[in-house]
Image (cartoon, rainbow, N blue to C red):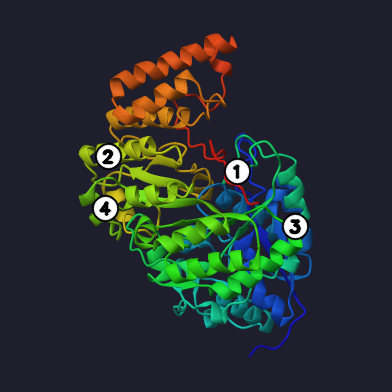
């Protein structure tokens, strides 16, 4: 189909966290999005150079990118909303200053959702929209042949001061996609960094596997499906996946993971799929295959409560036996009317049923809720907080967290958020400064003060009840579990303040020197699985 080339492509994976913020970029996450992009061009004979900025200081990462672009045909970067936007933009500025005639392209969820924001800067020649593997392949060949970018489907371009989209590209399945070209990745820097110890405040920190709370361990991230059929109005995926779900067959995934495990010897795999468990047959085939082959590692993923609610007992047992130790479930809301408005197929009771079925098998569930949707009533928000509290009270293996709503461009709720008074960031610097949405609210005034207080109290007791604040289970932790069982914001605030005072007296530290994990703060800490005793022997 394409003539072979020996020209160079440079792919830059931006830093996940602002180095000035005190939050560290994770060494747990492999640059999967760019590895998948490199697969076809690498097969076609292009020289591909991948730079993961999270392995270096910002200055060093940018220097490496500029140096690698000498004689290159194409520079590509990506990013999700947050600091990756800023770092990718700054690096591209350095690259274009040094190589003004170099073609530059950006992709990823944020660029796909707001291409005009990126293209208006004049730094990027094109934005790759949605699924990018085949788009990037054709783009590389078009640039090499001197063809117009308009000939490549799936791009957004800036022409005469406005946005122009090329022909729409259909979502494709794994029969048209290659495995990750793992040979392009030097795994040793990731292994060394993880075994040396993870930072206390780290973006996308992996969950500690059973038996490794006090000893080092090495984990990798993995990607096995694209898209999601859920029409969630708060998510930008429906616009670009077309509610399609394309998954790697279980047999192919099993072969790839078994080979990687033999080569790298990791303890944990984190699947970065938007909806890993949609197909019970695929999930069961992977689990049974791992057990049958004797491939032993822990793993976790994200799926929907409705899937776990309908899985058979045999499938859930197979998942447990294969090493599944955490599932993240999108709980979203505790209010039935709000759930229907969001478009999710989860029904009343699915969140509780899924978390209960997992806990019975000693599998931890991380259930994530959101409050503050445009037009959401205070009663709906209270119902969400109450469901999160009741789930957390049911089992210490359930981590139910409540996040403030974060409007995302490209989602169905973006325009309603604007109509309700949300003011979006301006330039790329402001977009890149947008915080992780589970750390703090970015839409002041959207959530009533009474709900903010209730959320703060709940997160305090949910975190304390697991022993995550003091690193042990004692009198305060037992009282926290009793509060989860009964609720009550007023008394909870008093007890939280009493605990804070007791901690100050016990440690003899002034308030300004206390840890960032203050007992009354959001407390989204999932790094330690308290009370876990499962063994892989």
Q: Residue tagged by mark 4?
A: 339
Q: Position of residue 476 (x, y in %)?
A: 45, 20
**Mark 1 or mark 3: which is in front?**
1
Extreme residue toward the bottom, this view? 1
Residue 145 in picture, x, y percent from top left: 67, 84
Tell me where residue 309 sits by quadrant.
bottom left
Q: Report how far apart the C-alphas of labels 4 and 2 lie in the structure.
A: 12 Å
Q: Earlier in the sequence, mark 1 or mark 3?
A: 3
Where is residue 227? Give x, y as percent. 45, 67
The residue lying toward the viewer, choosing from 118 and 345, is: 345
Q: Helix or strand or loop: what does disc 3 sit on?
A: loop
Image quarter of the N terminus: bottom right
Cβ atoms at labels 4 and 1 below 8 Å apart: no
Q: Is residue 166 above or below residue 24?
A: below
Residue matched to label 1: 208
Q: Badge 3, how many Cα within 10 Å: few under 14, some, many 20+?
A: few
Residue 262, by quadrant, is bottom right
Mark carried by residue 187: 3
């Amino acid at each position: 189909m394409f003539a072979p080339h020996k020209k160079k492509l440079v792919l830059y994976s931006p830093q996940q966290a602002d180095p000035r913020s005190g939050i560290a970029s994770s060494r747990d996450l492999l640059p999967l999005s760019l590895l998948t992009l490199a697969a076809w061009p690498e097969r076609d004979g292009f020289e591909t150079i991948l730079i993961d900025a999270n392995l270096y200081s910002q200055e060093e990462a940018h220097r490496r990118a500029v140096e690698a672009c000498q004689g290159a045909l194409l520079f590509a970067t990506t990013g999700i909303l947050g600091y990756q936007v800023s770092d990718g933009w700054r690096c591209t500025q350095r690259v274009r200053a040094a190589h003004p005639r170099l073609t530059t392209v950006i992709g990823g969820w944020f660029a796909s959702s707001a291409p005009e924001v990126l293209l208006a800067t004049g730094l990027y020649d094109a934005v790759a929209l949605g699924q990018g593997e085949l788009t990037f392949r054709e783009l590389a060949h078009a640039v090499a042949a001197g063809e117009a970018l308009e000939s490549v489907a799936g791009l957004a371009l800036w022409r005469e001061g406005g946005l122009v989209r090329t022909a729409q590209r259909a979502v494709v399945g794994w029969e048209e996609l290659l495995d990750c070209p793992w040979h392009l990745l030097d795994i040793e820097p990731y292994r060394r960094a993880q075994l040396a110890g993870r930072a206390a405040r780290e973006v996308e920190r992996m969950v500690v596997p059973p038996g490794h709370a006090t000893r080092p361990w090495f984990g990798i991230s993995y990607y096995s499906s694209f898209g999601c059929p859920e029409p969630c109005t708060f998510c930008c995926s429906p616009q670009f996946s077309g509610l399609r779900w394309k998954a790697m067959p279980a047999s192919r995934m099993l072969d790839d993971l078994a080979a990687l495990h033999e080569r790298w010897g990791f303890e944990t795999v984190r699947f970065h799929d938007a909806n890993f468990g949609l197909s019970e047959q695929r999930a069961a085939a992977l689990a049974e295959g791992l057990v049958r082959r004797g491939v032993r590692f822990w793993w976790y993923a994200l799926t929907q409560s409705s899937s776990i609610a309908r899985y058979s007992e045999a499938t859930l047992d197979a998942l447990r036996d294969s090493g599944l130790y955490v599932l993240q479930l999108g709980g979203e809301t505790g209010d039935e009317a709000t759930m229907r408005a969001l478009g999710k197929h989860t029904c009343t009771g699915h969140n509780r049923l899924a978390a209960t079925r997992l806990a019975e098998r000693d599998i931890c569930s991380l259930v994530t809720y959101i409050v503050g949707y445009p037009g959401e009533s205070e009663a709906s928000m209270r119902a969400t907080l109450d469901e999160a509290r009741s789930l957390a009270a049911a089992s210490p293996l359930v981590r139910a967290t409540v996040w403030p709503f974060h409007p995302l461009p490209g989602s169905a709720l973006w325009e309603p958020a604007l109509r309700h008074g949300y003011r979006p960031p301006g330039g790329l610097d402001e977009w890149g400064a947008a915080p992780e949405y589970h750390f703090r609210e970015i839409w002041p005034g959207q959530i009533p003060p009474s709900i903010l207080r209730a959320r703060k109290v709940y997160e305090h007791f949910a975190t304390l009840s697991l022993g995550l604040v003091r690193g042990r289970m004692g009198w305060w932790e037992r009282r926290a579990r009793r509060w989860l069982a009964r609720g009550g914001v007023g008394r909870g605030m008093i007890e939280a303040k009493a605990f804070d005072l007791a901690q100050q007296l016990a440690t003899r530290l002034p308030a300004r020197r206390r840890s960032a994990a203050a007992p009354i703060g959001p407390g989204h800490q999932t790094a330690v699985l308290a009370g876990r005793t499962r063994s892989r022997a």
